[in-house]
Amino acid sequence: MMRGGNREMRRMLDRMGLEMKDIGNVEEVVIKTDNKELYLLKPQVIEMKGKDSTIFQVVATDIEEKQREIPTFKDEDITLVIQQSNTTREKAIQALIDAGGDIAQAILSLTT
C-alpha cells in the first residue's frame, strides 16, 4: 500500500489522466464464461475513466458460481439450418441457441 493513503492515490490517478468514482448500491455483478457464471453479490465497484477506456475494479466477498448449461443440437438439425439459410455452421448454431432450439425460427432469423 502506498504511503500517504487515498490522497496520494488520487494525485497519481490525476497525473495519469484517470477520473475515479465509486458506483454505489450495486446489487450484483455477473461474469459469464463459456462454461460457468460467477455472481458477485453486493460488490464494491470503482469506475476509473481515462481518455480512451474505462476500468472497473470489483471487490466482493460473497461469490456464487454456477455451471452454465451448454445446449446441444443434433447434427441433422444444424445441417438443415445451414442448407435452408445458406450460412456457416457457427451462425447456424448461434441461431439455434437464440431460437431456443426451434429450427424454423432459427432459419427465419437467418433469412430475414
Image (tube, rainbow, N blue to C red):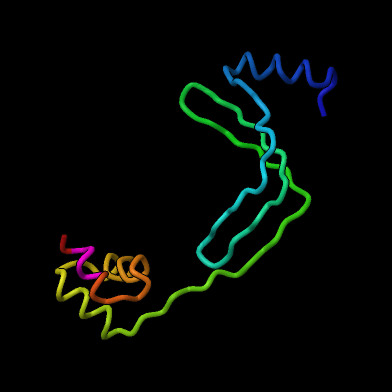
Residue shown at the point (23%, 75%) measured from the top left: 104
Numbered marks: total: 0
Residue shown at the point (72%, 56%) measured from the top left: 63
Q: Where is residue 81 in the image (x, y as percent from the top left)?
A: 22, 75
Image position of 51 (left or right of 55): left
Which quadrant is the N terminus positioned in? Answer: top right
Which residue extends farthest right? Answer: 3
Q: In this view, does 107 lie above or below 61?
A: below
Image position of 100 (left or right of 54): left
Q: Where is residue 37 in the image (x, y as percent from the top left)?
A: 59, 61
Residue shown at the point (49%, 29%) measured from the top left: 53
Residue shown at the point (30%, 66%) measured from the top left: 95
Q: Is residue 8 above or below residue 81?
A: above
Q: Is residue 29 above or below residue 38?
A: above
Q: Position of residue 61 (x, y in %)?
A: 78, 50
Q: Main secondary structure of the magenta part?
A: helix
* 95 or 99: nearer the viewer: 99
Image position of 11 (left or right of 52): right
Which quadrant is the C terminus positioned in? Answer: bottom left
The boundaries of the magenta stretch are: 106-110
Image quarter for residue 20? Answer: top right
* 89 or 63: nearer the viewer: 63
